[in-house]
Amino acid sequence: MLTRFLIDKFIPNKNDIINIDVRSKYGYLGGYVGIFANIFLFITKTILGLIINSISLVADGINNLSDVGSSGITLLGFKLSKKPADKEHPFGHGRTEYIAALIVSLIIIMVGFELLHNSIKRIINPEKVTYSLLSIYILVTTILIKLWMGFFNRKLAKIIDSKSLAASAVDSFSDVFATSCVALSIIFSPYLSFPIDAYMGVIVAIVIMYSGLSIAKNTLDPLLGKAPNPELVENIKKTVLHFDGIEGIHDLIIHDYGPNRKMATLHAEVSDQLSSIVAHDIIDAAEKKVEKKFNVILVIHIDPLQFECEDTSEIYQKVKNILSSFPSFISFHDFRIIQAKNKDNIIFEVVVEEKLRDDEVISLKDNMKSRLKTEFPNYDFFITMEREHAYFH
């Protein structure tokens, strides 16, 4: 009920999720709720932890402080996705989110390390944990708040299909488990002969450092260049191939410039019998369709096919059968036959497994040429080898 109230209150036209402004407002709502709720939890747990002398509860409060940073990053991502490109930054400002996230992750790791240090000191020199029934009620309240935040973020993520909000939901449910463990350690601490609170502090500190490392990894991946979402790859493929005249596609490469800022290139195969104007119109329509549906700026390179000629089609099929007999072969493209003075040239590109070493690629190319020359002695072959680094080969 509270989730529905917040959506109705702060998101006009809530059902128009294709609109980037409406989608951003869902992100803003999730980010602001996360910031304010986690600040409240941080203050509450830290003060209570200091009062009852619980190192694990203080550590759990610091964990909520790291969640404030995560919510801020989510908010920043949705804000930057709307900021237009400028002369100095023609691809937008989306990667600022990744840099901010990297800084936050380093802070989280350092905080976790310091808490780990203090918890180990508490194990060596134990101190008594004192608590009241009121403190347990307060802890249960914080658990219920985190539980609601998990369902809240999961609801928003489902509405707008947001990976960052979905991650926040998972993080909230993880915090519910962590705080529950802390509460149990505080309750049973007076009845145990060993400092369970300090040991729980070690566990929470490790969880905090792991969270920081996970954020750092997720931040570095898009900065270094990670493989695109397979679902996005498949959707682009289906959309482009839906256009009459496009017979096949390969060499798709997607560049990530931040949230909702992606550019892509691919090669589309069209008949060489099409006029340049007709081919251009088909490609132009496909590019615009992809940008409209997936917010991906697409540039398509045209590869003309000669399959209208029966001889070319027959040679193509034989070449394909020979190449397919090699275990490391994945696919080939850009096939064409060029007339020359002495011998006609058969030109194409071969995609092989990424794991092959350079010398193995060279050896494979020589073996392919040898087999093809035996089958087609009247042709010269010009083969370009490439490892599997793009999509739709």
Image (cartoon, helix red, strand yellow):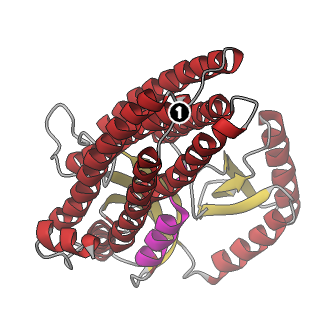
Which residue is tagged 1? Answer: 130
Residue 69 visible in the shown view: no
Which of these two is toward me, 179 or 315?
Answer: 179
| Residue 104 appears left or right of 190 | left
Residue 381 coordinates in the image, percent (x, y): 72, 53
Secondary structure mostly seen in the magenta stretch: helix
Badge 1: residue crowd in 10 Å (few <14, some 14–19, many ≥20): some
Residue 65 visible in the shown view: yes
Q: Quadrant of residue 190?
A: top right
Which quadrant is home to the C terminus? bottom right
| Residue 225 appears left or right of 100 | right
Identify the residue shown where x is 31% and y is 72%.
Answer: 293
For the magenta stretch, what is the residue range? 227-240
Residue 298 coordinates in the image, percent (x, y): 34, 59
Which of these two is toward me, 248 or 213?
Answer: 213
* Disc 1, SS: loop
Residue 339 coordinates in the image, percent (x, y): 59, 60
Does residue 84 sit above or below 286 in this rendering?
above
Identify the residue shown where x is 58% and y is 40%.
Answer: 186
